[in-house]
Structures are given as C-alpha cells and as structure tokens.
Image: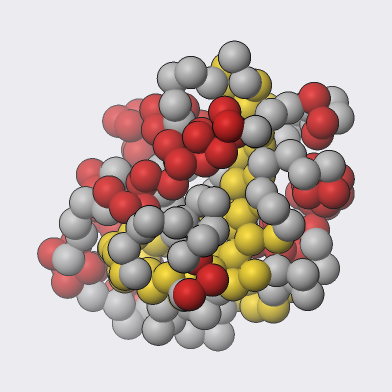
Amino acid sequence: MPRVVILKTGTTYPTLRETFGDFDSWFVARLAPELNVHVVDVTVDDLPGLPEAWDGIVVTGSPAMVSDREPWSERTAGWLADAVRAEVPVLGVCYGHQLLAHALGGEAGFHPGGRETGTHQVELLDTAREDPLFKGLPRQFPAQLTHRQSVLRLPESAVLLGRNEFEPHQAFRVGPCAWGVQFHPEFSSEVMRAYLKVQAPDLSKEGLDAEALLATVVDAPAASSLLDRFSQVVMNR
C-alpha cells in the first residue's frame, strides 16, 4: 500500500474536536482507503524521516501563523522543500498551502482584507485544465474557507491554478506534483457551520455577518474531491 504521511500543524477548536474529531481525522476520512496513512504532529514530534521514504505528503491547516516562523514550522518548511526537490507528491492545505509557498521562496502573511471564512466560490484558471490534480473540475465551484493569513507572493516557479475575488492565490502547483490550496477540501458543510458559530463574536467585531455567512454554507463536493484526486496521484506514480 502506498504510504502517505499527514503532517499535523495544529488542532481545531475544543468544541469542534469533541464533536467532529481533529484535523487529521478529517483528512483520513477523505483520503482513499487503499493508502497506508500515518499522522505526525510536527508541532511536538520529530519530522518523519526523509521525504523520499513517503509516497505522498499532506500538510494540514493550523491556528498558528506561518509569519511567526516558529522553530517547528521552519523545520517543516525545509523538509517540504526537500520533498518538492525529490518530487514526492505534496498537498498543503491552508496553513500547509502558506507554508509550502514560504518554503519555496514565496511570502505568507496577513491578508490586507482581513479574514475570509464560510463557503465561497473558487475560480480555476486555464492552467488548471491539464493539471494532474484539478483536470476535469468545474471552472467555478464552492469551497469551505477560513483564514486570516494568505500567500502574499507565490514562489517564482509556481503555477497559479485558482483564485477568487478576495484571494488571488487559492491554488498553485510547483513542479510536477506539489500543490497548495487555501481552501479546505477536508471540511464538511457541518464543520464549516460549526466554525462560523465559534467565530461569530470575532466576526461581529470584524464587521462580518455570521448569520449571513451561515445561511450561505453549502456542500462543496468538487473541492472535497481533491483528497481522493490526490490519492489517485499518489497511487498512480
């Protein structure tokens, strides 16, 4: 069985963890069952050997901020850069997306427009039409999002694949098989609603309408399909 490691870079809100489990369990549920999946919490544990020892690598989201450059995060960034050079398939999500960009010479930091949260549309560019991960997806689809930091500048070698009005860098690829996505393919609509309910007091302070955002949450099957698609990339290499 192909071996995939999930690099866990943080943990969700306690109330969500009690109901839905933590970040890693959401990814495990959507990756193909044919994969042999391991989880390593890189915030407290050692990195999992050489990147070449794995057939695929997934990097989760986190409440941490890439721009803080915590020692565990910088170590993980260096490891990811090695994985990209070795052409091991990588999928970075939210924090993982930002960390991958940072690792390869891009820049991550606070989005000048503040927070993006809820279900929002993602638009794919022409570059995604023949991309191994995105090929065949609709030109536009809903996705679950929650983030305050973004990829402010892509690595020079990156190919931009997706965007929306708020976030110009929703998805990118570097090399043949390393991807970053700002949106959350592992989130269900129930998880997204739970996030918005927990965030509601902060959203009000930030001038965002939590009730309006809750009302527009919908399922996002195209976005969620990326984890099965990434599984296929891993299994077909």
* Quadrant of image for the N terminus: top right
From the top left corner, tell me how far across and down residue 208 is, in percent: 30, 77
- The picture quadrant where one finds residue 119 is bottom left
From the top left corner, tell me how far across and down residue 134 is, in percent: 46, 56
Color theme of the render: secondary structure
Name the foreground residue: 174 vs 176: 176
For the view shown, which residue lies furthest in the left direction? Answer: 215
What residue is drawn where x is 33% and y is 32%? 20
Query: Relative to 216, does residue 204 appear above or below in the rendering?
Result: below
What residue is drawn where x is 67% and y is 41%? 89
Query: Relative to 19, does residue 88 appear above or below in the rendering?
Result: below
From the top left corner, tell me how far across and down residue 42 is, in percent: 72, 35
- Residue 67 visible in the current orientation: no
* Quadrant of image for the C terminus: top right
- Is residue 151 found left or right of 117 in the rendered image? right
From the top left corner, tell me how far across and down residue 9 is, in percent: 63, 42
- The picture quadrant where one finds residue 214 is bottom left
What residue is drawn where x is 48% and y is 18%? 34
- Residue 141 visible in the current orientation: yes
The number of discs equals 0
Query: Relative to 213, does residue 113 appear above or below in the rendering?
Result: below
- Is residue 91 found left or right of 190 in the rendered image? right
What residue is drawn where x is 54% and y is 71%? 127
For the view shown, which residue lies furthest in the front direction? Answer: 130
Query: Relative to 224, does residue 175 appear above or below in the rendering?
Result: below
